[in-house]
Image (cartoon, rainbow, N blue to C red):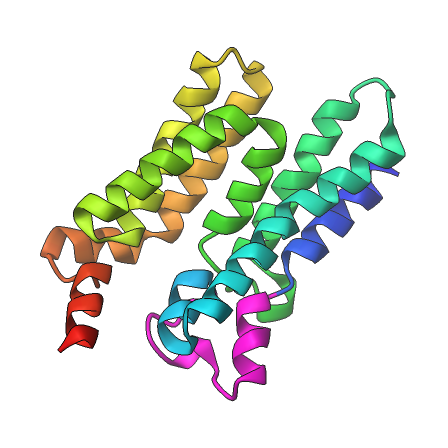
Amino acid sequence: MTYLLISIGYLLGSIPFGLLYGKLAGIDVRRQGSGNIGATNVGRLLGKKLGALTLVSDLFKGILPMLLAAKLLGDQPGAKEWVMLCGGAAFLGHCFPVYLKFRGGKGVATALGLHLYLAPLPTLAGVALFAATVRLSGYVSLGSLAAAAALPLLIWLAGGPPELTGVSALVGAVIWLKHHENIARLLRGQEKSWKKSDAEKAR
C-alpha cells in the first residue's frame, strides 16, 4: 500500500499543468520565454490568471498525495513518515516527470504545497521571505532560492522533527540545482526582472 501511494504521488506530481494550460491557449511554453513549465514562465507568456492557475495546480500536486496517504494510513506506525515521502515523490514528479522524459519544472510551487501541509507556520515565514526578496530585487528566482535555503532552518527553529528538516533540505537542494541557469544569469546580471517587465509595459 505504501509503495503504491508513493507511486501515485509521483504520477500526480508529474502532471505538467503549465504545459497543458499553455497547449489549451495554443502555446508550447517549453519553446517560449524561459522554456520552463512552471507558473512564472506561464504567467509571463499567458498572463497572470493562467500563471496563478498553474501555481495553484502545482501547489496542490504536493498536497493531494499527502492527504490521500494520511486518509488511508490513519494512525498506522510510521504513517507520518510515509505521508512525507508521498509529498516528496510528488515534488520529484514535478521536477522529473515521466510524461516529459524527466524534463520538468523547478519544483517551487509543489515544494510550497508539501511544506504548507507539513509545516505551515515556518512555510508562511518562508513565503514572507520570498515576497520580500522578490519585491526588493525584482527577481522571482532569487526569492525562490532564498526561501528554499531558509525553510530547513525555519523548520528546525520551530522545533520540527529531524526527518522533516532533512526532507526540506533535500527539496531545497534540488530546487537550487534546478535553478542553476538562473543562478548563472543572476551572477552575470542577465536574469529577467519583474520590475523591468512592469516598467516596459507601462511605456
Between 185 and 74, the one nearer to me in the picture: 74
Residue at the (15%, 68%) spot, across then down: 199
From the viewer's perspective, is 84 left or right of 49? right
Between 108 and 199, the one nearer to me in the picture: 199
Can residue 34 be seen at all in this image of the molecule? yes
- Asked if residue 70 is positioned above or below residue 144 in the image, the reply reads above
Percent from the top left, x then y, of residue 145?
32, 42
Residue at the (59%, 20%) spot, across then down: 163
Q: In which quarter of the image is the N terminus?
A: top right
* Res 189 quadrant in image: bottom left
Residue at the (21%, 75%) spot, across then down: 201
- Asked if residue 90 is positioned above or below residue 102 in the image, the reply reads above
From the viewer's perspective, is 41 left or right of 54? left
Q: Does the magenta stretch include residue 20?
A: yes
Percent from the top left, x then y, of residue 187?
13, 51
Q: Which residue is most to the front?
A: 202
* Res 120 quadrant in image: top right
Q: Quadrant of the C terminus?
A: bottom left
Can residue 169 be seen at all in this image of the molecule? no
Percent from the top left, x then y, of residue 8?
77, 51
Q: Is residue 164 magenta?
A: no
From the viewer's perspective, is 146 left or right of 127? left
Point out the stretch of residues depicted in magenta: 16-37
- Asked if residue 116 is positioned above or below residue 142 in the image, the reply reads above
* Res 172 quadrant in image: top left
Percent from the top left, x then y, of residue 71?
85, 35
Between 52 and 19, the one nearer to me in the picture: 52
- Asked if residue 125 is positioned above or below residue 143 in the image, the reply reads above
Residue at the (49%, 61%) spot, across then down: 52
